[in-house]
Amino acid sequence: MKITFMGAGSTVFARNVIGDCMCSEALRDSTFALYDIDGDRLKESEIILEGMRKAKGDYGKIECYLGVEQRKDALRDANFVVNAIQVGLYDPCTIIDFEVPKKYGLRQTIADTLGIGGIMRALRTIPVMADFAADMEEVCPNALFLNYTNPMAMLSGYMQRYTNVKTVGLCHSVQVCSEGLLKELGMEDKLEGRKELIAGINHMGWLLEIMDKDGNDLYPEIKSRIDAKLADPECKDKVRLDYIRNFGYYCTESSEHNAEYNMFYIKSKYPELIERYNIPLDEYPRRCVNQISKWKKEYEELLQTGIKDHKRSREYASHIMESIVTGNIYKIGGNVLNTGHLITNLPENACVEVPCLVDAYGVHPCHVGSLPVQCAAMNMTNINVQLLTIEAAHTRKKEHIYQAAMLDPHTGSELDIDTIKKMVDDLIEAHGSYLPEYH
């Protein structure tokens, strides 16, 4: 068994996913192939994971592959490929994604999934993933590609539509969605045995149904508690709670993310909304700086005190691999192409997030049916941007980048068309060699 991790310099995430595999009897004896283009970061991951491997009983082995010239060897004969790359890193590309739009008065919170930041991140990442796909088609054509990199729907959608690589997109927001909501509203007593249905798109999957262990609908009680929670100045989840009030349903990803996926909350003409909804502008750059600093400190401590033991996390990856290897059925929320209209009122070429069953034959998406019309409409405002960004990456036509930005809900509600085009041009120039040529 060979498990390849692309972007293994993301040490914290590699530690979680590969550490999870080391906790599984079905996977622990695998060859874990670590690939990155940064030698220092790759070495850090090797040290941490080798220490974990020995602590877990010395099963399996770790191999390291550095740089594009070793990429095919990293992928060769892999059974599973985990993707967690970040093209351009925080510095310079994330900084560019925030600072250039800010000059035009366009403010963002996370900028990795939608918005002008999400568009640019997809455009610099898709060409790299297309190269991965070409290598995989040659040296591990039957491998399953587990994508964790954002923007999830754009990257997974591209792989699913324009390559022959079996791809599923994975995001932990599905696992924690209903639990987080019930805890936020003081309904912890309803957690055990609850049943739920979540479907939509990545970061905007809708909690369509939530019932307690006896089958009672929990939404009436949830809705009765919304106003009091929204009045709490310390509440950090006001955008999603406001979704329940205005659209009837809660969604998967955090409020700091969802604040920028629509035209409602970050508005230069209504600056008071930022405080009212506790919207953390420029949150992702702050988070990046803190994470980099925190990891440096933690790494030094680990070198001095020894590698910590790892307990299996809630990430889907190891459970999917285990299910395929053993044949035991496992349920996930997966990002897959909407083939056969799994969600009937979203387009077939959209990448949707739906319940999927996993067994020895792979990942099997489940038919959901129609979303409530207002939820489908909200999803479509995001899908429009995703499809146009994928089209831009596929055709290399700059007009599709303009159109994606024009139709982005937040960008289009703040800026006029000429300004949007000028901002896009400035972003393309600032990204330089991180982007291919567009015409």
Image: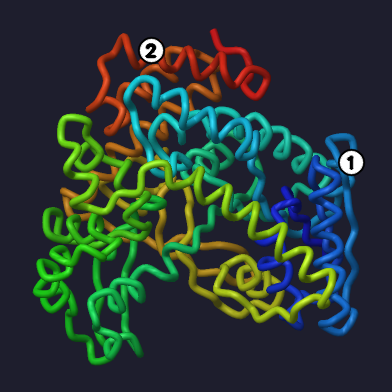
Sequence-earlier tag: 2 or 1: 1
> Mark 1: which amino acid?
Gln
Pick whichever, 293 or 34, lies toward us: 293
User: Is residue 193 rendered to the left or right of residue 168?
Assistant: left
Q: Residue at x 30, y 59 (%)?
A: 251
Q: Residue at x 61, y 68 (%)?
A: 320
Q: Pointer 1: what residue?
A: 70
For mark 1, give the secondary structure.
helix
Residue 339 appears in the figure: no
From this view, report whether residue 96 is shown above or below residue 23.
above
Rendered-image quadrant of the N terminus: bottom right
Q: Pointer 2: what residue?
A: 421
Picture quadrant of residue 113: top left
Q: Residue at x 32, y 24 (%)?
A: 105
Rendered-image quadrant of the C terminus: top right
Rendered location of residue 253, percent (x, y): 37, 57
Rendered location of residue 23, percent (x, y): 72, 80
Rendered location of residue 150, percent (x, y): 53, 45
Classify mark 1: residues with Cα within 10 Å, few (<14), some (14-19) or many (20+). some
